[in-house]
């Protein structure tokens, strides 16, 4: 089942899209797609666009396997 994207807060939404979308990334991280949806939601129900740091290494590894340029700066929304 696909969960529609309502909230698109960054950096979470941008990172998930670059890596192939919620369903694809959720399968790789072994979390539910609704967990990733919460990353894109505003507080108090979501993380406000922030990606929990415990997932950063797995996301960077996934990006390397998929040949997608992704850095810690992208994950932290630091420019």
Image: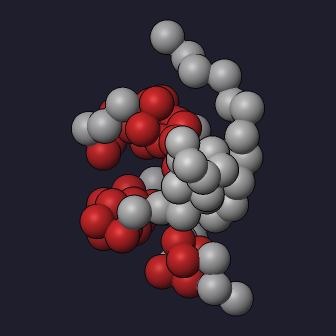
Colouring scheme, one of rainbow, by chain, secondary structure, one colour: secondary structure
Q: Is residue 6 visible?
A: yes
Image point (48%, 80%), residue name: 72
Image point (64%, 64%), residue name: 11
Give x and y (percent) for residue 22. 52, 36
Q: Nearer the viewer, residue 11 or 25?
A: 11
Image point (54%, 63%), residue name: 50
Give x and y (percent) for residue 61. 33, 64
Residue 5 drawn above or below residue 2: below
Quadrant holding the C terminus: bottom right
Task: Give the farthest residue toward the bottom.
Answer: 79
Indicate the quadrant where residue 31 lies: top left
Task: Give the farthest residue toward the top.
Answer: 1
The answer to whether 33 appears left or right of 28 in the picture is right
Give x and y (percent) for residue 49. 61, 58
Indicate the quadrant where residue 12 lies: bottom right
The answer to whether 28 appears left or right of 33 in the picture is left
Image point (63%, 77%), residue name: 77
């Amino acid at each position: 089942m696909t969960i529609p994207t309502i909230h698109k807060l960054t950096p979470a939404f941008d990172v998930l899209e670059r890596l192939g979308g919620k369903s694809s990334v959720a399968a790789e991280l072994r979390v539910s797609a609704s967990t990733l949806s919460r990353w894109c939601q505003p507080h108090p129900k979501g993380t406000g666009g922030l990606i929990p740091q415990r997932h950063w290494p797995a996301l960077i590894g996934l990006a390397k396997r998929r040949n997608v340029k992704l850095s810690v700066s992208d994950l932290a929304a630091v420019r």
